[in-house]
Image: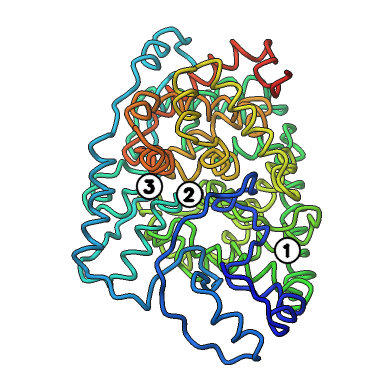
Amino acid sequence: MQSVDSHNGKNFWRKNSKSVPGSMRAVYGAMHPPITRSPKSSPRKESSQKKVESNDSFQDYQESVNDAWDCGDDEFCVISDVKISNRMVQSAALSVINSHRSGQLGTNSALAELHNQMPAAALEPVETDMPEVIPHATVNNSHSSSAVLSCTTAAIEGALPLSRLDPSAATHRTPAINTSGSKRDAVRQEKFLELISNNNTNLPELRKLSWSGIPPSVRAVTWRLLNGYLPANAERREDTLKRKREEYWSFVNQYYETRHEDIYQDTFRQIHIDIPRMSPLVPLFQQTIVQEMFERILYIWAIRHPASGYVQGINDLVTPFFIVFLHEVVPKEESLDTYDVEQVSEEDRAVVEADSFWCMSKLLDGIQDNYTFAQPGIQNKVQQLRELMKRIDFSLHCHLERHEIDYLQFSFRWFNNLLMRELPLGCTVRLWDTLHAEPDGFSHFVLYVCAAFLKHFSQHLMAQRDFQGLMLLLQNLPTSNWSDSEISLLVAEAFRLKYVFADAPNHLQANKK
């Protein structure tokens, strides 16, 4: 970038530094991890700049720069001034899709061997009856070149799974939540009901039973118990739920009207921007009434937690609770992905919203340092993952280091969103069964889950021979066809890693030399 030596240029930097196109801002969230080193500069093609009607100093600055761009609300750059042929755009997208489709792996043999070693109770398959949530939208060939290019960019940067670009992948995507049932599932359901209906629920036993998955018919009440939102004492449950739900709606009445005040409007604006990006191809989350529910949940949480406020990525953590609690009030024969939430009674919607708020709040209380300034909790976890991988898969670790892959570049999003953007929604719900069942599951056990997740794709990662190939794969790991069985193997491997390394904490220490 050329320097500006004129007097007007100096005034511009002094008075309008926040308005510099392309200037660095501290933005924390799933797509924007804290910057730890200066990125290598890369040449950009010259593009014509639109004239901006502003003061002379800005015009002088703009004319002296040929690589600036507007910082819009969207996190993806859509090129509108450059004509790109549809054939070239579609060819680039198809190339990315095919490279990942051809590299999809089957079940890792090491995890399969571990499956045989784990206790039977820990790996019982759970056949569920929750309705499917399946993305139906695909890329239409008639889309404009800029729209396709922006979608391709989003996939490369990891905002969207590649299956959302590929019509065939979306069509054959594993159902988000399995709808089958079995006699064994009915037996397990009876065990859950027996524990839950006791005057004082035995939480250690409930955790043990939940570790291998929770039947959908009892998942909502089980999550409330394991989350700490619902008391173990059955006599206190009704009064507690009534009081907490009324308390949430009193917060809404007290604070929600302040969202347009100057001091809070930036927070609400970011929430309003992020919510439509959640599961953009699932019609359920594009309904206005659902987005308004999420806006209230996230805004009230941000107001009540000023130490962190709202951070990009927190919006994703509401989704599993919302889906599970909504399933309680939606008829079983209905499909959740297309169900019109306005058909749910206002009272039931209020319950779903309030319970989602309190359970998300309980979860975030245990990982608060993940979302405070500079997100130190996540940065520590990233460093711990690096040290752990050095122990469990040294070859892969060296391969990533040799190609200058920083763990922060891909695993920041894993910890920030608890792997939600890496897995289908149904797999996330199944994973959260285990994370709820594990003591400190969301703050500690998730480290070993991420290590097992990375190790699972070790062979395919080792086959990549350059930085670009590795980053494309790491940001778009082929999990679109995963189901509960893959998650069961994943958490089993995570449990093995925890068992081996939890009492050897040196692997979680930074280099001590």
Q: In percent of the image, x 60 and y 85: which residue is there?
A: 60
Q: Which residue is mark 3?
A: 131
Is the residue under label 1 in contact with that under label 3 (CB below 8 Å)? Answer: no
The secondary element bearing badge 2 is classed as helix
Q: In percent of the image, x 34 and y 54: which residue is there?
A: 135
The amino acid beneath tag 1 is Trp
Left or right: where 445 falls relative to 513: left
CA distance for labels 1 and 2 = 21 Å
The numbered mark at residue 249 is: 1
Q: Nearer the viewer, residue 237 or 206?
A: 206
10 Å crowding of disc 1: few (<14), some (14-19), many (20+): some
The secondary element bearing badge 1 is classed as helix
Residue 250, visible in the rendered structure: yes
The quadrant holding residue 8 is bottom right
The amino acid beneath tag 3 is Pro
User: Where, quadrant-wise, is the C terminus in this rendering?
Assistant: top right
Q: Which residue is mark 2?
A: 327
